[in-house]
Every structure is written in C-alpha cells, then in structure tokens.
C-alpha cells in the first residue's frame, strides 16, 4: 500500500494559518493529534469511511467527534435533507418539521414533555442552566470538575477571556462521588439551582468512567431532596447508547437533557428536552439564534432518529464496539502492553498505562493507525457508528496489530 502523505493538507494549513487564528481551532486542531501522521482537511465521507484531501482513505472511528452516527451521507438522511432543501431552509418562521421533530423527540424520551432547538451543544447546556435558575430563583450551578459542557465562559476548559465573575456561581464536585456532591450542596445550602453532568465521565484525554451503582440514583435523590434541577448533558453520548436518552441506560431520568452531536447525523442541530414542571421557566428564558429554526437539519434529524430506531443502530454500535474491544485487548496482551480500555463499547477510549497521564504511546499507536488508514484520536474518546461493519473491524485489527508492534519497538513492553 502507498504510504500516506499529506501535501495538500499541509498546503491548505499554511494558507489557513495566514487568515484564520491557529488555522484550525478547538477540538479539531491538529496539535491534539500525532504530528505528521494525520491530515488536517477532509474531502469526503461515505458510510464508515472518510477520504482526506490527499486521497488517503480511513476507517473513521472519530465520526466527526460524534455527529456521524448512521455513517457519512446516509441515503435516508440525505434524501430527507434534499427534499426539505428543495422547499427552502430558512424562513421567517419555522416549517412544519419544527413541530414534527419536537413531537417525535418527546415521544421517544420517557421523561420529557417538551423540547427547544438550537445549533450547538454549548447553546443548550448554557440555556438549561438558565432555565434551572429561572425555575428555582437560585444562582448556583454544580458541575463535575474537569467535565466539558461547551465553550461558554462558565465552563470553557481554557482560561482565555474568562473572568472570576464568570465562574462566581459555579460549584464543583466529582463524578462517581456522591459525598462530594452532598458536601457541595451543604456548603451552598439553598443556593444551587441545577446540577449538570454527563451520563458517563468522558473528559478528554482521561480514561472514561461509567457511573458506579447508585451514583445516578443518588444524584437524582440529592436533587429531589434539595429542590435542585437535574440536567443531563447528553450532547456527546445521546443517540449512541439509547434512543430514549443515555439516562435510560444508567437508570436515571433527569429534569432537563441536552442533545447535539448525533441528533441529525452531521447536520447542525441541538435540542434541550424537559419536564412539564419546567415549561413555564423555559418560556421565560429568552432563547433564539439566526439559524435555530432552519428546516433542513430538522428534516435530517427526523430521518436520522427514525432510521436509527428502525435499523437497530444502537445495538449494532454496541456489538461492533464489543468486537473492537475484544480484538484490541487481545492484541495488547500478546504485545505485552498494558492498556486501559474504558467507556461504553460504542464510545470507547484506550490509553497505555505506562503513559501515566501523558499520551506518548497513544500518539505513536494512533499515528501508526492513521498512516495505515484507521482514524483514532490519542486524546479523545472514539465513536463507533451504525455504518461500521464486521469487515471494518477485521481490517482495523490488522492495522492495530502492527500499531501495537510499533509502540513496543519504540518504548519496549
Ligand atoms: C458533553 C458535551 N457537552 C457540551 C458540548 C458542547 O457542544 P458544542 O461543541 O456543539 O457547542 C460538547 C462538545 O463536545 C460535549 O461533549
């Protein structure tokens, strides 16, 4: 096979750096990957595969960092989007699909009575905290230290442009540690409006943690006992683990839940769903955006959610994710390398124990995979899509066997 090279990507990056700060910023910035081993620009995608601007092909385990859940350019989603596009996308008021999609989301989400729409996960996470404040008349929000809920000042992970005042109403606790939440609630008695947390701990660059037995129900009870709104941030995991929201998988029903990434198979849309008891407060918190009502992403979302359900997508992602896990763990064992494989099967993450919080071995492993046509990321959890096939997994395991070997060669067992 021809070795992968990235001339076109590199040339585009040079041009980008001249006119865009950093060239590419945020979670897709190349600095988070293995230097020299990844493309910076993609040309196209089809099913579980993507092609970069140099024509290199990859089996895609990042899925655009979550949005691609049925596979790139899924025919049913594209057809629904195309049909709506022929009618128009952006009007003076929403199209009927605004209502159709809201009804559908409410019908598949056991706890929810209503939904609002926006564009980004950050939009809906921030708005959910405001609804909690409006409903309770309290100022503070509790979140897990190190969790990611978006780019807004109350939660952005980097300090640039953030003031102490932006964080003055934040209270922190630890995932899977009810004692730390109880302590935070006692310390801020009567002041906490909402608790926001993801269905499992998936902080970038760290091993993931599933909720331990009793954690989610414990959070629910603490919220109920103290009149606190429970916000489940399902932006990253939503529609990959359970059609009714990831809380269903972990036995908890929140008061508000936020979705974005996988809701529309790559079309820009976010949603926040909530209980009847919060509908009045929801109406009182101003929420709008130039494109919040765009019809094309909503048509795509409706088709995406229906196909995910009808085609058994969640189950397929889980079983293929399990095959990948079994294969990788067996290879690591044979190579004599200790790894930690964490997260649910459809959203796995693998670290090398000897990296001890750094990512040196992970970068060599993922870089070797990328140069051989398998796209993982060393500092972010991976995503399986419903388009991945058993053949994809087999081809992947051929590549990873050599990538483990490359790690062993460079660092020893
Ligand atoms: C759990 C979680 N919440 C919120 C966000 C923010 O979403 P967005 O990047 O669409 O604003 C993300 C994005 O990665 C996320 O993973």
Image (tube, rainbow, N blue to C red):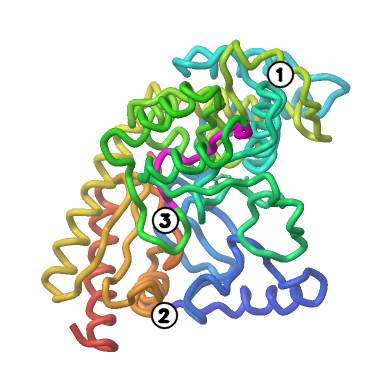
**Dot placed on the residue nearer the N-terminal end, 3 or 1:** 1
Front position among marks 1 and 2: 1
Magenta range: 191-202
Name the foreground residue: 265 vs 255: 255
Location of residue 206 with respect to 299 vertically, above or below: below
Residue at left offset 54%, top offset 33%: 263
Q: Is residue 235 left or right of residue 136?
A: left
In the picture, residue 2 is in which quadrant? bottom left
* Image position, residue 197 (x, y; %): 49, 40
Does 390 lie within the magenta span? no
In 3D space, how far apart are the residues under numbered discs 1 and 2 (Cα atoms)?
57 Å
Front position among marks 2 and 3: 3
In 3D space, how far apart are the residues under numbered discs 2 and 3 (Cα atoms)?
26 Å
Q: From the image, tell me which residue sits under label 3.
A: 381
Classify mark 2: helix, strand or loop.
loop
* Image position, residue 284 (x, y; %): 78, 20
Location of residue 35 with respect to 126 vertically, above or below: below
Front position among marks 3 and 1: 1
Classify mark 3: helix, strand or loop.
loop
The N terminus, quarter of image: bottom left
**Dot placed on the residue nearer the N-terminal end, 1 or 2:** 2
Q: From the image, tell me which residue sits under label 2.
A: 3
**Dot placed on the residue nearer the N-terminal end, 2 or 3:** 2
Q: From the image, tell me which residue sits under label 1.
A: 281
In the picture, residue 288 is in which quadrant? top right
Asked if one can make out residue 73 in the rendered structure from this viewpoint, the answer is no
Q: Is residue 77 left or right of residue 161?
A: left
């Amino acid at each position: 096979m021809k070795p992968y090279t990235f001339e076109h990507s590199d040339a585009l990056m040079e041009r980008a750096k001249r006119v865009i700060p950093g060239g590419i910023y945020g979670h897709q910035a190349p600095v988070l990957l293995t230097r020299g081993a990844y493309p910076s620009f993609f040309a196209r995608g089809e099913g579980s595969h993507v092609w970069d601007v140099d024509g290199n092909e990859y089996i895609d385990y990042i899925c655009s960092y979550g949005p691609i859940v049925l596979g790139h350019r899924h025919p049913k989603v594209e057809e629904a989007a195309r049909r709506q596009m022929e009618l128009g996308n952006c009007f003076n008021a929403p199209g009927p699909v605004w209502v159709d999609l809201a009804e559908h989301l409410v019908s598949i989400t056991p706890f929810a009575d209503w939904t609002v729409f926006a564009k980004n996960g950050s939009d809906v996470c921030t708005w959910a905290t405001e609804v909690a404040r409006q409903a309770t008349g309290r100022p503070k929000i509790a979140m897990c230290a190190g969790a990611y809920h978006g780019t807004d000042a109350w939660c952005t992970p980097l300090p640039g442009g953030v003031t102490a005042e932006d964080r003055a109403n934040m209270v922190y606790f630890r995932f899977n540690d009810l004692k730390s939440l109880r302590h935070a609630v006692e310390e801020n008695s009567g002041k906490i409006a909402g608790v926001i947390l993801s269905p499992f701990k998936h902080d970038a660059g760290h091993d993931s943690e599933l909720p331990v037995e009793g954690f989610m129900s414990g959070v629910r009870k603490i919220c109920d006992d103290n009149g606190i709104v429970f916000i489940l941030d399902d932006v990253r995991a939503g529609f990959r683990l359970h059609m009714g929201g990831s809380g269903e998988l972990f036995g908890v029903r929140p008061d508000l839940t936020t979705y974005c990434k996988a809701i529309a198979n790559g079309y820009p849309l976010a949603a926040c769903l909530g209980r009847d008891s919060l509908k009045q407060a929801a109406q009182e918190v101003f929420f709008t955006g130039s494109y919040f009502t765009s019809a094309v992403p909503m048509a795509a979302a409706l088709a995406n959610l229906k196909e995910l359900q009808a085609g058994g997508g969640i189950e397929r992602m889980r079983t293929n994710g399990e095959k990948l896990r079994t294969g990788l763990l067996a290879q690591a064992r044979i190579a004599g390398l200790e790894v930690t494989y964490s997260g649910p099967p459809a959203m796995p993450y693998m670290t090398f124990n000897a990296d001890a919080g750094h990512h040196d071995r992970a970068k060599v492993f993922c870089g070797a995979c990328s140069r051989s046509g398998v796209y993982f990321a060393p500092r972010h959890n991976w995503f399986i899509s419903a388009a991945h096939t058993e053949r994809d997994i087999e081809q992947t395991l051929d590549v990873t066997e050599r990538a483990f070997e490359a790690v062993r060669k460079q660092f020893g067992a």
